[in-house]
Amino acid sequence: MKKELIFLGPPACGKGTQTDKLAKFLNFPHVDTGSLLRNEIKNETEAGKEAKNYIDKGQLVPAELVAKIIKNRLSQDDCKNGFILDGYPRSVEQADKLEVINAEINNGEKVDFRAIYFDIDTNLLVERIVNRRSCPVCGEIYNLQSKPPKVPNHCDNDGAELTQRKDDTREVAQARFDTYFKETSPLIDYYQNKGVLKTIDANGTIDEVWDRLLKVIE
Ligand code: AMP
């Protein structure tokens, strides 16, 4: 049966890292709305121009715009057997929209749908965000405190100069948390009520969280 996994959790809870690992493990595409939107901005598309105003302020991009991008991505061939959604849905409105999109792309066929919630102490996450850097070439994520590159500011894999996301400043990070608590956290109850929620303790090392994740996707 087709598997659809939705990853829920606050900004910088580690779900991007775990999604990436799981996508490779299951051979499913990792569909990450933040990256899809940043790509639209990089390519200077109309959607990208509109999305930028919201991303720069730590707010949600309008639901219609994201739905169009996500439907287009989930309709592609590589999503036929399953996919992992990271960062979508991010509001009850988007979750309702995803049900409509799913009905359209799956032609009424049943799917194994699970929402995995990364339960984490949010106090340290702003520090995690402001110390986050990434490689513009291979996408490797570093943290200046917990996972620094061997040569300061250069990628271990290819030597490229590391970059910081524009919205990874203290001020925008705070706004992203406010948006998360107001708009996204109600999805925990939403999926609990549908009986598809799995919660994992996301505190700890990457390996510890990975072991817990594997137990809930079996
Ligand atoms: P992320 O890379 O997941 O931290 O997302 C970065 C930013 O992209 C967010 O702060 C939002 O502005 C925007 N974004 C990502 N996913 C969504 C979504 N599902 N709905 C609306 N905006 C989104």
Image (tube, rainbow, N blue to C red):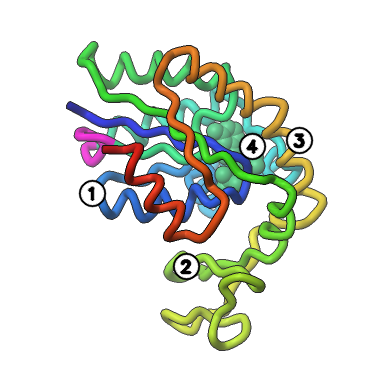
Task: Give the labeled residue for mark 4.
Answer: 50
Residue 38 on image: x %, y %: 55, 49
Residue 173 on image: x %, y %: 74, 49
Of 195 and 161, the residue lying toward us? 195
Q: Secondary structure at mark 2?
A: loop
Q: Which residues are magenta?
A: 77-82
Q: Is residue 21 left or right of residue 155?
A: left
Q: Secondary structure at mark 1?
A: loop
Which amino acid is tagged 3?
A: Asp
Task: Give the labeled residue for mark 2.
Answer: 140
Tell me which numbered mark, 2 or 1, is placed earlier along the sequence.
1
Q: Residues within 10 Å of mark 1 (few under 14, many from 20)?
A: few
Which amino acid is tagged 1?
A: Asn
Total tally of numbered discs in the picture:
4
Query: What residue do we see at 77% from left, 41% from top?
Result: 175
Q: Was residue 79 drawn as part of the magenta stretch in this picture?
A: yes
Q: CA distance from mark 4 to mark 1?
A: 32 Å
Query: Disc 2, ligand 1: is the CB inside 8 Å?
Result: no
Name the mark nearer the viewer: 4 or 1.
1
Q: Is disc 2 in contact with disc 4, using a CB cutoff of under 8 Å?
A: no
Task: Give the labeled residue for mark 3.
Answer: 178
Look at the picture and state if 159 lies above or below 162.
below
Which disc, if any, is residue 27?
1
Query: What residue do we see at 42% from left, 60% from top?
Result: 207
